[in-house]
Image (cartoon, grey):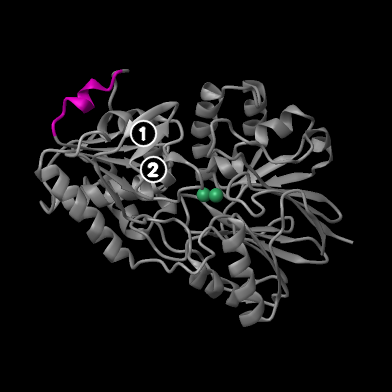
Amino acid sequence: MESITFYGAASEVGRSCFVVESHETTMLDCGIKLDGRTPVPPTFDLKKSGEIDQVLISHAHLDHVGYVPALYQNGFNGKTLMTKPSRDIAQVLLADALRLQRETLFTKKSVDKLFNNIKLVEYRKPSGGVEYRDAGHVLGSGMILLDTGEHRILYTGDVNLRPTRLLDGADLEDLEADILITEGTYGGSHVRQASKKTINTFIHHVGTTLRRGGKVLIPTFAIGRGQEMLLTLESHMRGKIIPQAPIFLDGMVKKLTKIHRHNANYLKKEVQQRILTSDDDPFKSEYFEEPTSKTKHEVFNAGRAVIVAPSGMLVGGPSVRYFKKLAPDKKNTVIIVGYQANDTPGRLVKEGVKNVEVDGENVEINCQVEVAPFSGHSDSLELMQLARRVKGLKQVFVVHSERDKGLELAKQMSTKLHVKSYVPIVGEKVQI
Ligand SMILES: [Zn+2]
Ligand SMILES: [Zn+2]
């Protein structure tokens, strides 16, 4: 009898961690939840780390990879599989997590042990019952097909069916699996806006703010949406659609942008072309600047400017510092571009709350607040489309979703596709 245990990201977003038990024990992702003051690990009992045979990582966001070192620290000796860009990104993000951690989740030694035990995988090259497919979510992100002998499991990781400025959409060709573990971040009834409309809204608000001499703050994940923002801003500034102004990249955005250049073959053909064959590298734009001073005075003194900085939900990271300083002034604009978890300052700002506590400080919000949903996640229509493409599908588990949205998606899957659909809770073990 085979089983899946959901140690995190079950009826919640964050700390993805699932264990498939068959003739071997495979962990799918091992992340931490980062929307509170302290990171929350998955409920997997670390004493059992030695029993895991392999860990498969879908992509390098910390809610998917941020807890793997703890496994190595507690007796895991196997390989961790991921793509090369995921490894490069994880190296930067985990080093940073190590530096910033308030309570010790893992040591530098265990991070090193992880990177000494990585097995790189490529899309569409099956090996040992595991195959990765482009998930279109961030650079190097993968959907994972796991053949256990009795079952074929497709785990979507975080998935985006839509092509973006940087990446092709998810690869849905010839998918075959009887079990689907799908993300459901936007599993509710909300339908995604057309990308063009989002870009127009975004550019309109950036332009208006710069013209009145204000600053635009874009809190974002350091990887993924960050680079999407940069390319969008760069092309509109170069085309003189918005006024010229410095675009400050803070908090590893620059480092991670470099990783995109080094892994250009994972980007869309046209971006690849620009990077590889001409002086037209969009990531090397003259508009991009990196604040080097601790006080960030060059940013605050810049007059009009755009700032792209993590974290995306205003929980820690340099975006918090900029937010405190810029939010009280009505000349400025904060643009919310990504997913905002419940109870985070970012969610409150998005909902129009006028006084928000950020990092222990009460901040008065007089600036303009706008929302331009540049999501790296598919909406429920697209997730249904994905599930329809899976041949032989019998059972669906919805994860990486607030419970009500997950239930909505599961209901759609069972009524429209006639498959068993289920939203597990954290710690639940299901026989398959
Ligand atoms: Zn992600
Ligand atoms: Zn995620």
Q: Nearer the viewer, residue 47 or 380?
A: 380
Region in magenta: 295-303
Element class at badge 1 = helix
Q: Residues within 10 Å of mark 2 (few under 14, many from 20)?
A: many
Task: Tell me the kind of residue under disc 1.
Answer: Ser
Quarter of the figure with residue 200: bottom left
Image quarter where the C terminus lies is bottom right
Q: Residues within 10 Å of mark 1 (few under 14, many from 20)?
A: many
- The residue to which callout 1 is attached is 319
- Name the side, left or right, on which 136 lies relative to 43: left
> Residue 268 colored magenta?
no
Task: Tell me the kind of residue under disc 2.
Answer: Thr
3D distance between C-alphas at marks 1 and 2: 8 Å
* Residue drawn at x 51%, y 69% as measured from the top left: 380
- Name the side, left or right, on which 243 lies relative to 332: left
- Name the side, left or right, on which 2 lies relative to 373: right
Element class at badge 2 = loop
Residue 169: x and y in percent read: 44, 64
Q: Nearer the viewer, residue 73 or 209?
A: 209
Q: Are marks 1 and 2 in contact (CB under 8 Å)?
A: yes
Image quarter where the N terminus lies is bottom right
- The residue to which callout 2 is attached is 220
Quarter of the figure with residue 32: top right
Question: Which circle's residue, 1 or 2, is located before the other in the chain?
Answer: 2
